[in-house]
Image: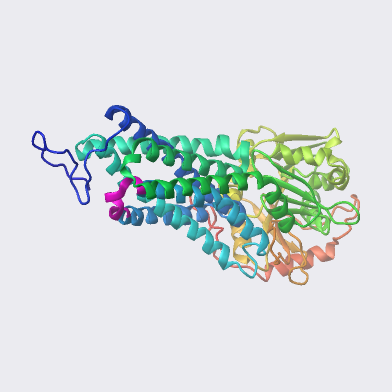
Amino acid sequence: MIEPHAPAPPGAPRSWGGEGGQSQAHLPVRPGTGRFLVLAGVFVCAACGLVYELELVALASYLIGDSVTQASVVLSMMVFAMGIGSLAAKRLRCRAAAGFGAVEAVLALVGGCSAMALYAVFAWTGGWGGVWSGGPRCLLVAFSLVIGLLIGAEVPLLMELIQRIRRQDAGGAVADLFAADYVGALVGGLAFPFLLLPQLGQLTGALLTGAINAVAGGALVFGLFRRDLSRRGRRLLVTANVVVLGVLAAAAFLADDFERAARQALYGEHVRVALHSGAQEVVLTGGTHGRPLALFLDGRLRVSGRDERLYHEALVHPAMSGGPHARVLVLGGGDGLAAREVLRHPGVERVDVIDPDPAVVRLARRDPVLSALNGHAFADPRVHVCTADAFRRLRDTRRTYDVVIADLPDPGITESTKLYSQEFYGLARGVLAADGRVVVHAGPVITRPRVFWTVEATIRAAGLRTAPYRVGERAPGSAAGPDRPAGTTGAPRDWGFVLAARTRPALTLDPDAPRPTTLTRASLRADARAAARTRVPGLPPSTLVQPRYAD
């Protein structure tokens, strides 16, 4: 807490009180201009600090998943460390200018390189689920703590500097400092998702932020407070800033090569397409020279040419059997593979596909391997594709459907939780025809039975009768997905599905449709019995305000 002091007598040197206080600074500009420049430095440093926080949250959510947990860990660690950093910076107040310059140089280096370091560890150590899984998570916490410590150290040092320019009561100084800090945080918070991330990506965006941080800190110290530094101190700070800017510039120059090498380490050597859409990173590998195709979305395997047919046949064919199927709604399925299976059934008149990412849809239309795999489903005039949020689209639609197919990411992924809620299934029930059916991909049964049966309980809570089943049990690690994190050796041993309707649905196969290559009626009945043996009774449904899919 900054304490006000009585005015100094005429002729006495002016100083602001407090432990380690220094006399008024000799500035190359008028005090009003110097004060404005310090507040401008606060603004820039605050913007950079918030970008570092958001970059860690975004990268951790992308690499690990479960964005709520990652945001909680990163932000709580950083806020805790900021308090420790503020206390520690009290010892530097007697050398506030040199201390602030050193803090900003280290912060620029650590914050700017944090994304590249985390991505490198993730790519070259087998991923977060690999044998060294504790190391990357510890590194994430370490970066959060170090960046928080350095950000926390800024405030006492900046308070010292602004008071040395023109003495001010403590309340006014705090108000001015925090106003600049919070406005800077606003700008940084908006710049990250709307400018840095889409235009530069996580790696280059973090490096550029570090460079801006270093330049702003160095300019403030050398421009206003260089007389407070000894000759040796000036040399050290100049050297430190030049080294930091050199490291950041070299890293930015090599960022593209680094990203390609890390992507190959993560996804394999046969990456054919890698792009950042507005919603996610899309990577397509293999598909040529006998190599199986694989589609990764945000680092998670969504399609594998090795066994996608087993997954999509199990998802689609039971729902298309046992009743009318002229009008079909596919939620997700931007790869076109679920639509391919729907179109195999006679009597289909219209298929509406709702996917949030137009980049995936374009890839499914234009990539020769993926479009061949989906049978050029999107070229069929009966198929109508809409890129939109499935929840909002369900709420706004006035059509009814005979079949609704939810080909969505794993329910354990935070971003997908609302699409596995009681409210969402209530909306799906509302668009079903009287004798319509809905089928949901509910994640692996063997490894995550609680999540699977929570999906089933949630569907029942929405007023539907269910027929749960699973397919694909095989040796551990041999199934490919979907939703397996890239770079991990473990994989789901099966896939779980829930077929639902207003009356208890029949788990069968349409005798008039082409016979699936991987399913029979007997195998479906056996799959239903196998799923029933894993039942976890008494689970409450998941809702928007109380999601229940965390393991």
Q: Is residue 60 magenta?
A: no
Residue at x-position 61% and y-position 49%: 416
Classified by dominant secondary structure, the portion drawn in magenta counts as: helix
Task: For residue 4, say whether it is visible.
Answer: yes
Q: Quadrant of residue 518?
A: bottom right
In the rendered image, residue 542, in percent from the top left (x then y), is placed at: 54, 54
In the rendered image, residue 359, in percent from the top left (x then y), is placed at: 73, 38
Report the residue that reaches farthest toward the left.
Answer: 9
Q: Quadrant of residue 498?
A: bottom right
Q: Is residue 381 above or below residue 462?
A: above
Q: How many marks?
A: 0
Q: Nearer the viewer, residue 211 or 507?
A: 211
In the rendered image, residue 18, in percent from the top left (x then y), is placed at: 19, 48
Q: Quadrant of residue 465?
A: bottom right
Task: For residue 154, say whether it is visible.
Answer: no
Residue at x-position 21% and y-position 36%: 167
Residue at x-position 38% and y-position 56%: 80
In the rendered image, residue 347, in percent from the top left (x then y), is placed at: 86, 40
Q: Nearer the viewer, residue 348 or 213?
A: 213
Image color mode: rainbow
Left or right: 300 in relation to 70: right
User: In the rendered image, which quarter contains the C terminus?
Assistant: bottom right
Q: Is residue 92 magenta?
A: yes
Q: Nearer the viewer, residue 453 or 67?
A: 67
- Residue stretch rendered in magenta on the structure: 89-98
Q: Nearer the viewer, residue 477 or 317?
A: 477
Residue at x-position 71% and y-position 66%: 489
Q: Is residue 412 above or below residue 6?
A: below
